[in-house]
Amino acid sequence: MNGIIGRRGALTGLAGILAAASLPRSAGAQPRGTVTASLLGNLPNIHPWHVGNVETGAANLLAYSNLLKVGVDGTLVPDLAVALPQISDDGLSYVFELRRDVRFHNGDRLTADDVLYSYEKYLATGRRRGNLRRFISDVQKDGDYVVKVSLKDPWVGWMRLMGYEAAIVRRGTDVTNEGATGESLYRGSRAAGCGPFIPKSFRADVEAEFEAFPEYFGGAPATQTIKLVRIPDAATQLANLRAGSVDIISNCPPKDFAPVSRESGFGGAARPSAGIFYMPMNVAKAPFDNIHLRRAVSCAVDRDYICEEIYSGLVTASALPASPNEFWYEEDLAKQLAYDPDRAKFHLRAAGMPRGFAFEAIVPVPSAYVEAREAAVVMQANLAEVGIRMNIRQTDFVSMYRSAQNGDWQAFPHPSMQSSVEDYLVWNNYHKDGNQARWMGYRNPAYDTAVMESFRYLDHARKKPALRKVTEILVDHCPALWIGRLNAYHLWRSDISGFGPRYSYFMDLTSAKKG
Amino acid sequence: MASFLLGRAATLALVLFGASVLIFLVVRALPGDPAIAMMTSNATPEEIQAMREALGLHLPLWVQYGSWVSGALVGDLGRSFTYSTGVSRMILDRFPVTLHISLAALVIAMAIAIPAGVLAAKHKGGLIDHLARVIAMIGISMPVFWQGLLSILLFAVILRWLPPGGYEPLSAGIGVSTAHILLPAVALGTAYAATITRMLRASMLDVLGREHIAVARAHGVPESTIIWTDAFRNALIPTLTAAGFSFGYLLAGAVLTEVIFNLPGMGRLLYESILARDYPLVQGLVLLNVTVFVLINFSMDALYALLDPRIRR
Amino acid sequence: MPEMLFEVRDLVTRFRTEAGEIHPSRHVSFHLAEGEVLGLVGESGSGKSVTARASVRLQQPEGATIGGALLFRGQDLRKLDAAALRALRARQIAMVVQDPAAALNPVMTIGRQLTRIHRLHGGTEAAAREAALGLLRRMRIAEPEARMAAYPHQLSGGMRQRVLIALALICRPALLIADEPTTALDVTVEAEILALLDELRRELGMAMLMISHNLSVIGRICDRVAVMYAGRIMEEGPTAALLAAPAHPYTRALLASVPRGSKADGPLPAIPGEPPDLARLPAGCPFQSRCPGAAPDCTQDQPLRPIAPGRRAACWRAAA
């Protein structure tokens, strides 16, 4: 309790508060109108703890709040907490002070008991409770409005993960009821959340409707009704936007994005997200147990071409896990893995395979966010130029993960969306305790130490040296081919305001407004 | 008649039993694991195991099968892994959509195919025949999604005559409902019409070459009667079988049409339930499709008997 | 001399096949007097069936007939429009074909098939029914009322052929084209049907063009015979005279191949050599390659020429 968050962190927090305050929400004004947004992926439920994709994330943001939420640019901003938490020096203790003006949809006031109830239930029953259970040792209250979270190991990333998929519900809410009829958390409960909108109707995979919650602690929403409709094809989404049957679309074919966003009558924006497009290589198995071959692959792929020509700039090329616009990007390190066929040939010679080698890439079809198949073909051509043969095997995601878990894989290029790259992916993939580390096959105590060190800080300045160490090791060992970072991009009709893409890739429609 | 129905019911039961075993095993033979599908890659192995247990996947196969079948017998097809909703309920929700679209597509297909097929055969080698053939070729070879997108662009975006997609049931008003269903039904129906036109044309040509047509002509039966009474009814019989089977496929769900036109039908549901390894949902949907196929078969048999006195008893 | 009923002059038909153009009828001429029976005989593929059908404009496609005059009671059928032609059908010209199983519409009752023809040509339903029942009785069909409600597949082959004949005769035509009417039947039924047909023909005073590859059938009921080969009439004359003393080498070969004392079922037994390829006919006589008496002048065309009173043949060396 003696530590205080870094100055930089406080500033970001403040910026977040200011940003929230300046949102087009005016207290007292009646919510009106309807904003309809289309989603590409499935919307199987609107349970607060079953966020499995960005679509469920969008619904979650409307109906639920959490202690903190992930801001537009990926920084953490206070939500039910009045400010970012105080983090102890050892990085193990987090103290949150709750707002006192929060009401649930049924009118009940939020207190620390609701938070405790939610964490208790989430850690016991939440679908993806494993990550939080791995780090959180207990959650306690100190009076009605202070909550203290103790960790087993330092990990600032838990707050992003929490913002991602573990919303606060009113205490006593039945979280496990999966009854086929009636109101339940799966199909939307009018009483469980304290977000700006109340679930009104829900048809799995088809549509969900939310109505404004006038007593929302952030001020009554500007819009009376938000409709989420599922349109599972990007080109059709665009047609629907043009026809005016939806106001905002989650996706469009990448090549259409820039032209349409410049068209009069339409708006659009893209921003860096937590998503990454990369190709892990199985370091535990030939041929990629040879570090030179991994590096050869990394130097042989023309990321700029893939990102600009195939994905129309909606993937930002980077040879590192960090995007060039992020604080932990290291220019000098990126150069070592950047596209350079001569360097690739050098690594092939170093590996004793000057004439190249062959490997199999498992490509998921269909893949979310961007089609991996399209890039895989370019990679294949790039690699062939230095003598490396990449055989493509197309399969669906589930089969791919199955193969991965059985260790039966060599490489798989795929897009992935995480709660954060620096606070989650680097741990999840290669730290010895990471969920995917078992099948990634990578073991390195020095790396584990560097990751855990970076996990102690929220503040960029303090975090950066540790992340540089992490990146150095990753560049040195090259367990994956990093191709680029995904940008979140959406299009909307020009009469829509208060909406834009977010780091989390979730569509945040809470302040969207028409006219 | 009663024995006919009884026999058919027994066949249906047998087919369904066989199908249930097959479906059950095939679904489980798919590589991958529903627990992984639900948890995605970021889950811990413990979480995946917990999910497997929650889904009952740790039980022996015969136990899983037994509980599925005993439920299915009383109309309970289990609970969807993905949607945590009863499978029967999901199907009840989706089936009317697919049925509605399929029937509309069938009507459109028949309205196109019957005159086109008959006229093409009547004027074999003539302008109408060539025109019908070219159009049918386009209908068959133009991907449904392409045709769908073009029609959305034209009728919904440019002309703004029709909505670009979505589904409204008949209860929402016949006008609204039809406006929503028109484009997908046409997209689906034209592809279907192309197939039926070709079959009907071939079948008509076959019949028109038969001796009884020559005899009818020799006795002064007018050409229109020859075409529509003498030839068409005979040509319809083989065409109907093929059309019936195609209709079965329509009902099984036209995935692309449902995706492009954003229709919450069974095709899309089946496709996604397979990707998600949602065993109960896949099983339920496939079982329903098998039932529909068998029933269509039966009704084709009945229709056959109605049209063809040779197999009437 | 009875009055001329039907005269075909120089009929030419043409089909396009993958092998090239063929001419199933090449300048075919024949005639029938009222009440006369002309037999058109030849092997399969000789063009007799196409010729017979084309002569009454029943060949499909119609455009295949490219030349000739088809004079029915002095009126050229080729100059009639569809309606006028249709008015002649059934009442003036009718047809019986070989395969009764295929010649009846399988999805229409016998009664409906019979009565609709009668009604097409101006009868009432009751009159049509009366005529149909009478004719079925006349055809010695038991329980005609029940048969009227039956579908073709419920009848035997012989029964179907009787129905087919009834269908042709229901409007009492003046000319019947009988295209191998008994070929599909077994011998006893064949004799019975032939006798019945002959009897009805006499009763109605109807002329008949009888197409057959079976010389014994021809011999039994025809007044005159025309022998066809490769789209041409090779020889023509009164039945008895022609069968007793064939003038054309082809007719002789044909007669020689008929087994004695039994019904010649199916195609005629072999005449040495291959039947000609209609797409690649030699100049002159089409039979030259198989003819035992072939000579250099056979490559010159020899049209039918009179060789005796009432007899004509298309051979340089033919003599009665």
Image (cartoon, coloured by chain):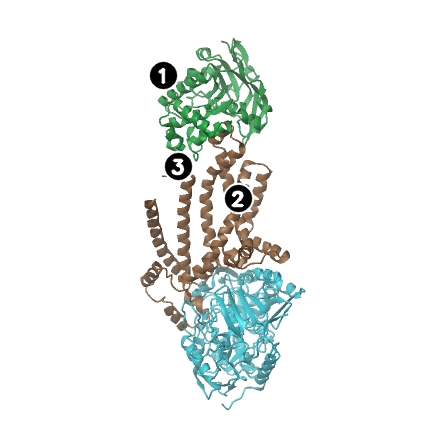
Chain colours: A cyan, B brown, C green
Does the rendering let one see residue A362? yes
What is the spatial separation of the Cα atoms under label 2 and label 1, in whole angstroms?
A: 56 Å
Q: Chain of mark 3?
A: B
Give the residue number, with chain letter if any, for mark 3: B310
User: Residue A170, image x and y in percent?
Assistant: 46, 79
Q: Name the residue rendered at 52%, 39% in the picture.
A: B201
Q: State if disc 1 and disc 2 touch (CB < 8 Å).
A: no
What is the spatial separation of the Cα atoms under label 2 and label 3, in whole angstroms?
A: 26 Å
The crowding category of the residue bearing disc 1, from other C-alpha atoms within 10 Å (few below 14, some 14 to 19, many at least 20), is few
Q: Under tag 1, what secondary structure?
A: loop
Q: Quick check: do tags 2 and 3 share a chain? A: yes
Q: Quick check: do tags 2 and 1 share a chain? A: no
**Residue C106 picture quarter:** top left
Give the residue number, with chain letter if any, for mark 2: B113
Q: Indicate the quadrant containing the C terminus of chain B: top left, top right, bottom left or bottom right.
A: top left
User: Residue C294, image x and y in percent?
Assistant: 51, 15
Q: Under tag 2, what secondary structure?
A: helix
Q: Is residue C155 above or below residue B247?
A: above
Q: Chain of mark 2?
A: B
The crowding category of the residue bearing disc 3, from other C-alpha atoms within 10 Å (few below 14, some 14 to 19, many at least 20), is some
Give the residue number, with chain letter if any, for mark 1: C261
Residue farthest to the right?
A264
Q: Indicate the quadrant containing the N terminus of chain B: top left, top right, bottom left or bottom right.
A: top left
At label 2, the amino acid type is Ala
Q: Under tag 3, what secondary structure?
A: helix
**Residue A382 picture quarter:** bottom right
Q: Is residue A425 above or below residue B4?
A: below
Q: Is residue C307 above or below residue A83?
A: above
User: Residue A409, image x and y in percent?
Assistant: 45, 65
